Amino acid sequence: MHRARSDATVIAALIAVLAGCGGADPASEPAPPPAIAAAADTAAAEPSVYELVEIAPRVYATVVRAGVNPSQWATSLIVVRRDHVLVVDTRQHASAANELLETVRGVSDLPVRYVVNTHWHGDHVQGNEAFRARHPDVRIIGGATTAEDMRTLGRRRLDEDIARVEGRITAARGRLERGEGEDGTPLTEEEKAELPARIEAAEAYVAARRELVLVPPDLAVDSVLSLTDGEPRVDILRVGPAHTRGDVVVLLPGLRIAAIGDLIEDGFPWFGDGYPAAWADALDRIGALGFDAYLPGHGPVLRDREMFNIQRRFARAVADEARRAVDAGLDLEAARAGADFSEFEDHFTRNLSDRAPEERRDRFAAFLDETFARAFAEAAGEVSTTS
């Protein structure tokens, strides 16, 4: 599966809802993107899943509350500077971004002068529209390729996901008319009563997606951009290709804080648009800075290096194994069969502790299959950073 991180599990959740009885389980999807907790009413769900954490004076993060799967919700960084605010990543749609804007207002009445998009995936950038509407003069900063990728890959994947949900809506209407579930068995009276509301919710989701305007960055970072117009100093460093071809990280060197986007996640990292060998190099580069606090793209503020180091070792191990296989002339199937990454299973499946052991193993295996295939393609020279 190669779907945009921002929407893949949203779609899976909607499919499950429209199925009426059973259907697809977002946790069983082979890709590990963020999801929504309730299948359609994202606007109602989002304000309740986040909490505000103070990392340092005038520096805050919005992260999920305890008990919420962190892989389902992107984090944001809020930096209150001398006469303005900087925000890193704007969430996945207008209602989520508006909730973030209200959080910003709760810590400062200064205008938002800068937004930084760590990469092009929708759950980090699709709130740009709301920020520009509220703060017309805001500068939106991203990597050198982020704007192009939003206009092309981001737009195409958004359209594909709309079409996918519309197809499921049509199928659900047909099942409702026939009184059948997805498996052909008769719908119960309860399911007959619930399915129209679920279809309506899915239609509202599609309508909102159709209205979404992608607002790309207007300031591109080729190497490093230092914002010295206030304290704390902010350095925006391009480290891609890594998770995508144009990742940037946001550094507060005076406070030893780094917002590193989806280079690290509390859950399954999404390698589907990534470059595992270059990703490992980027993590080595960031790790060498020796900062004290890291904000991952999904998950809590990291005050120690355990998660960072495990995922850095994993990216390096996958990339190195793929390189050895390609150099040895193995095909993908033989290479994957001979690779053992079991030492990382407990780390990546720890958020699935409520699932059966075999389900956790299957989920990890699916993650490995996709990740290793991407690393193999990179090692074979089949992954381009130019398009």
Image: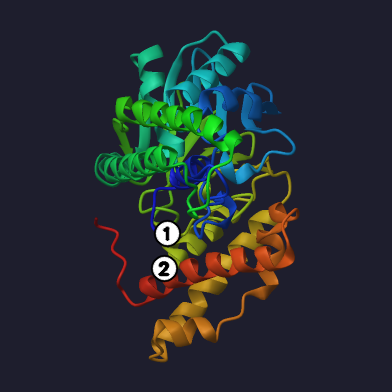
- Residue 317, compared with residue 34, is above or below; it is below
Q: At label 2, which amino acid type do we have?
A: Arg
Query: Measuring 47% from the left and 51% from the top, which residue is drawn there?
Result: 182
- Residue 206, compared with residue 362, is above or below; it is above
Query: Can residue 135 be seen in this snapshot?
Result: no
Is 228 on the left or on the right of 296, as rendered?
left
User: Which corner quadrant holds the N terminus?
Assistant: bottom left
Front-most of 116 and 98? 98
Mark 2, residue position: 374
Query: Measuring 29% from the left and 39% from the top, which residue is drawn there?
Result: 147
Q: Tell me the number on the disc at residue 272.
A: 1
> Horizontal and vertical percent for residue 2?
38, 57
Kind of element beneath mark 1: loop
Q: Earlier in the sequence, mark 2 or mark 1?
A: 1
Front-most of 374 and 247? 374
Front-most of 77 and 282? 77
Q: Tell me the number on the disc at residue 135.
A: none
